[in-house]
Amino acid sequence: MRTSDIITMEIDLADDQIPIRSFPEGAHLVPFDPATHRRLARDLLNLAYQHGGGDIRSTEAWWSELVEDAEYEQALLFAVMAHHSNTMIAFAQVWSSGFIKDFAVHPKHQRTGLGSALLSHVFQVLFARGLKHSSLKVRSDNPSNAAAFYQALGMSSLATSHRENGGLG
């Protein structure tokens, strides 16, 4: 078993602190449709987490757990699709409390501004709902250096805990 630190990060959703970013050309945010998007979302999460940073799960197990959670709202599932294709290139799952449960950008679209644009949009939606803060947890051994990405968007580390893992993630 290997161990991994889990970093809890948070951002103050004050209106003047939310980073405003535009989606890059070729990407568009679409309303999440479970019939069309749930398998695409889970496949993207599994792709993003295949080298660590998150859990690999089946669509069925993930979806049933997701929709049964008291904080689930379909409006807080964010899908970004590539223009002219049925390819999901970014996804965020957020609880009604403002906790970002899952966040992934397709590896071919990382470092293009897509992740920044999606996270900026999520922060704006949460602010519009009256939330004061948004938080997430990230593994310190995340292979895409996610903690630095979140910090660059204004999130700060609140706490670090220790977790033992087996396998991927």
Image: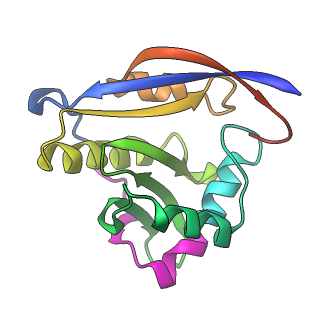
Q: How far from the left and from the top, in percent, is residue 89?
A: 52, 61
Magenta residue check for 28: yes
Instruction: State the residue in front, 95 or 31.
Output: 95
How many numbered marks are there?
Answer: 0
Which contiguous range is marked in magenta? 22-40
Horizontal relation, residue 118 to residue 37: left or right? left
Horizontal relation, residue 111 to residue 127: left or right? right
Instruction: State the residue in front, 32 or 135.
Output: 135
Relative vertical location of residue 119 with respect to residue 57 in this rendering, above or below:
above
Instruction: Name the residue: 73% across, 53% down.
Output: 56
Q: Which colour scheme is used?
A: rainbow
- Residue 26 visible within the image: no
Instruction: State the residue in front, 4 or 27.
Output: 4
Relative vertical location of residue 42 with respect to residue 37 in this rendering, above or below:
above
Residue 116 lies in what quarter of the image? Answer: top left
Horizontal relation, residue 128 to residue 70: left or right? left
- Residue 38 visible within the image: yes
Instruction: Name the residue: 78% across, 22% down.
Output: 3
Considering the image in quadrants, where does the N terminus appear?
A: top right
